[in-house]
């Protein structure tokens, strides 16, 4: 139980304090169209393959060991991370050099880990969604949602970082307010 508590503490610190709820990766993606495309592809790979792996973990993990779900999810994301970097390395050194940065910022992003837990929770609530296909489809949807969020942020990135915005509010604070307003608008559409 101590290990689980420590892992949850480290994950919460990373997700909430350091990564600012995944917005730092969104900011990297919003920098330009090349960043957006590469980050979106990396996030989509991790969410879709990770969701499929989460289905397998959920099926194989005995009920008595459900406290270790976070550990197994982290391990599977780590394995996907290593395999993706290895594949990029063997594809070519140029693609590896250009793309590894995006794999690094995407691998342990809260969007990826949050997707695994959200898909699992949804499958627990609606048993008809507890299939491998639905897990992978949900992972693809999460990747598409990240792409949409990054595109919306890209639309406002230059304006929120311009000289028209007060210096103390420019950059990260303005982006967080903008994301909060967009989030409330999207939530209201539900």
Image (tube, rainbow, N blue to C red):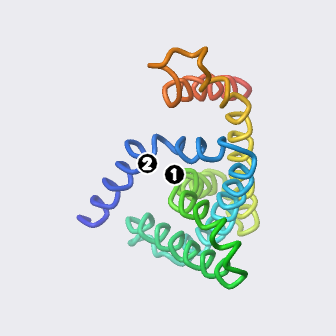
| Quadrant assignment for the C terminus | top right
Give x and y (percent) for residue 162: 62, 22
* Depth check, front residue: 136 or 97: 97
- Tell me: 38 left or right of 17: right
* Depth check, front residue: 143 or 89: 89
Identify the residue at horizontal 27%, vertical 67% (top origin).
3
Identify the residue at horizontal 61%, vertical 72% (top origin).
53
Q: Quadrant of residue 50?
A: bottom right
**Eyeballing the image, is 18 above or below 88?**
above
**Eyeballing the image, is 85 above or below 46?**
below
Q: Secondary structure at mark 1?
A: helix
Give x and y (percent) for residue 54: 58, 68
Q: Quadrant of residue 57?
A: bottom right
Of the numbered discs 2 and 1, the one sitting upstream in the chain is 2
Q: Secondary structure at mark 2?
A: helix
State the residue position of label 2: 15
Identify the residue at horizontal 58%, vertical 74% (top origin).
80
Query: For the residue carrying disc 1, how many other residues have a C-alpha within 10 Å: few (<14), some (14-19), or many (20+)?
Result: many
Mark 2 and 1 residues: CB-CB less than 8 Å, in contact?
A: yes
Give x and y (percent) for residue 130: 67, 63
- On residue 110, which mark appears? 1
Q: Residue furthest left?
A: 2
Q: How many marks?
A: 2
Identify the residue at horizontal 59%, vertical 54% (top origin).
115
């Amino acid at each position: 139980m101590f290990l689980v508590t420590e892992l949850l503490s480290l994950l919460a610190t990373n997700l909430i304090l350091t990564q600012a709820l995944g917005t730092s990766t969104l900011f990297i993606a919003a920098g330009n169209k090349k960043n957006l495309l590469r980050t979106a592809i990396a996030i989509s790979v991790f969410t879709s393959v990770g969701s499929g792996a989460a289905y397998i973990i959920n099926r194989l993990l005995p009920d008595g060991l459900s406290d270790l779900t976070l550990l197994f999810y982290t391990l599977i994301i780590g394995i996907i991370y290593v395999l993706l970097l290895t594949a990029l390395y063997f594809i070519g050194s140029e693609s590896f050099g250009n793309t590894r940065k995006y794999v690094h910022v995407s691998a342990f992003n809260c969007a990826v880990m949050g997707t695994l837990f959200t898909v699992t929770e949804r499958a627990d609530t609606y048993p008809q969604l507890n299939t491998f296909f639905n897990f992978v489809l949900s992972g693809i949807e999460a990747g598409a949602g990240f792409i949409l969020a990054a595109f919306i942020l890209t639309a406002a990135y230059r304006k929120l970082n311009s000289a028209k915005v007060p210096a103390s509010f420019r950059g990260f604070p303005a982006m967080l307010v903008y994301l909060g307003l967009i989030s409330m608008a999207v939530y209201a559409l539900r």
